[in-house]
Image (cartoon, helix red, strand yellow):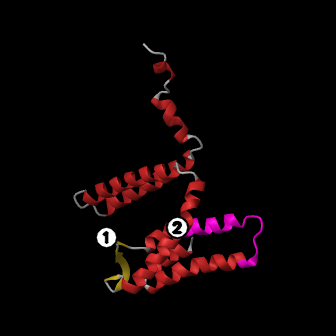
Amino acid sequence: MSSAAFDKPSLLQRVLPLFRGFDWMLLLVLTMLASVGLVAMYSSGYDHGTRFYDHGRNMVLAAGILFVVAQIPPQRLMMLAVPLYTAGVALLVAVALFGIIKKGAQRWINVGLVIQPSEILKIAMPLMLAWWFQKREGQLRPLDFVVAGALLAVPVGLIMKQPDLGTSLLVLAA
């Protein structure tokens, strides 16, 4: 037998670093809130279990995605801020020009598949503002806040034009 087999770290030794610095209290609170939500959904309208199980499956998928995204270093996420924001705003302009109208609102666009670009801004807007203020850290002036307000006003205005008050308020709350 080769000594190389003994030098190879076990699966546990390779997985443990993924959980270093993990906020276990936050995970506990999120799990409790999700459980209460599932119980409320189950008790309010159990329709042969399809919605309940589908929602439970979606929550497990979301938790998996959350865990994977949490492994990405913040510096890497910052590199995505400007391209994601630019693409989101460009798609919002495209929606205003030739978007798909459903139920009286022009919120969707077909780019090979039908998407709602305002959903991209829910993630892109906080990233963009974090990028903007991180670049000016230690030397903030009033003009920097005016520019940040303009960065926020453009997508919020385009989303309000669709009209989509709920999403525009969520993007504004960024």
What residue lies at 48% left-to-right and 31% top-to-bottom?
A: 12
Q: Earlier in the sequence, mark 2 or mark 1?
A: 2
Segment colored magenta: 125-143
What residue lies at 55% left-to-right and 58% top-to-bottom?
A: 77
Rendered view: 76 above or below 22? below
Mark sitting on residue 112: 1
Q: Position of residue 17 (x, y in %)?
A: 55, 38
Q: Which residue is mark 2?
A: 83
What residue lies at 50% left-to-right and 66% top-to-bottom?
A: 123
Q: Position of residue 137 (x, y in %)?
A: 73, 64
Q: Is residue 44 left or right of residue 143?
A: left
What residue lies at 75% left-to-right and 71% top-to-bottom?
A: 140
Q: Is residue 102 left or right of residue 15?
A: left
Residue 141 part of the magenta-drawn span: yes
Quadrant (top left, top right, bottom left, bottom right) of the C terminus: bottom right
- Asked which secondary structure carries label 1, the reply is loop
Q: Main secondary structure of the magenta part?
A: helix
Quadrant (top left, top right, bottom left, bottom right) of the N terminus: top left
Badge 1 local density, few (<14 within 10 Å), some, or many (20+)? few
Badge 2 local density, few (<14 within 10 Å), some, or many (20+)? few
Mark sitting on residue 84: none
Residue 79 part of the magenta-drawn span: no
Q: Amino acid at mark 2?
A: Pro
Residue, far top: 1
Q: Amino acid at mark 1?
A: Gly
Q: Is residue 34 left or right of residue 44?
A: right
Q: Position of residue 108 (x, y in %)?
A: 36, 77
**CA distance for labels 2 and 1:** 20 Å
- Asked which secondary structure carries label 2, the reply is helix
Q: Position of residue 103 (x, y in %)?
A: 31, 83
Residue, far left: 48
Q: Nearer the viewer, residue 136 or 32?
A: 136
